[in-house]
Image (spheres, helix red, strand yellow):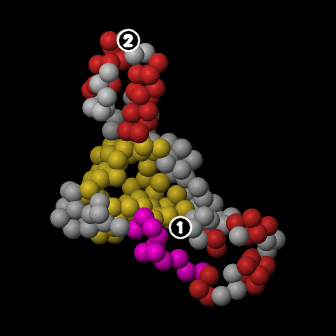
Amino acid sequence: MDDETKLAPTNYDKITELFPNDIDWIYDFTTNKFYNFAPGGVSNANAATFPAMTRLGMTLAILNLGPCSMLPPHYHPRATNVVVAIAGTTHTYMINENGVPIIEEVLTPMKMTIFPHGSMHMMYNAGELNLYIYRCFDHNRPSCTTGFVFTVQVAQTARARNRNQEATSRYVSFLSLSDPN
């Protein structure tokens, strides 16, 4: 469907041939497999999950975080992330590049912030109620790389290549990996 939508020469063709029913123009975030609050999830509406969004060049997402939950440090290599708090209190941290101070914000309902393209950021819900955030990306496939996964993968690779180097062993042990050798 994605290819057909991309090839539709006009909106008339897109509507009359590919999405002729009213229901084709509605996306229900609650049906997304990642929509949950235990501990939380990100539900994306983009060309992959909602074909009517093909060629719009954006992604709209809902972030749900249950009580005392966090979205770990991560960045989007292809997109700027605009975040709007809907319910709950959202604590955010962002660092844009080396040498730039960490920016810490607390978002309450109807407040927003921006995480520029490529900036490392994280969010958490320290409250006792569920937290809802709308997120908009300026790319139809914003991608996501988590900082912790990257760090662990680098440590594991370094460890495999340098098993006998003391500094690498101390660093890997610090990350609390299961195999200390």
Instruction: Determine if the magenta segment contains residue 33.
Output: yes
Judge left or right: residue 66 versus residue 17.
left
Question: What's the residue at 79%, 67% (across, down)?
Answer: 7
Residue at image x 38%, y 61%? 41
| Residue 139 on image: x %, y % | 59, 56
Frontmost of labels 1 and 2 is: 2
- Quadrant that contains the C terminus: top left
The relative height of residue 165 versus residue 13 in the rendered view (above or below) is: above
Q: Is residue 141 above or below residue 15?
A: above
The image shows residue 134 at horizontal and vertical percentages of 41, 65
What span is in magenta? 25-35
In three-dimensional space, the C-alpha distance between marks 1 and 2, rounded to whole angstroms, equals: 47 Å
137 displayed left or right of 133 = right
Q: Position of residue 177 (x, y in %)?
A: 31, 32
Q: Which mark is residue 164?
A: 2
The amino acid on which the numbered mark 1 sits, given as a three-letter code, is Ala
Residue at the image position 55 percent from the left and 62 percent from the top: 59
Q: Nearer the viewer, residue 56 or 146?
A: 146
- As drawn, the residue found furthest toward the bottom would be 22
Q: Magenta segment, principal secondary structure?
A: loop
Q: Which residue is mark 1?
A: 45
- Circle 1 sits in a helix, a strand or a loop, which is it? strand
Which amino acid, by three-letter code, is at mark 2?
A: Asn
Point out the tag, 1 or 2, that comes first from the N-terminus.
1
Residue 141 visible in the current orientation = yes
For residue 55, the mark is: none
118 or 6: which is nearer to us? Answer: 6
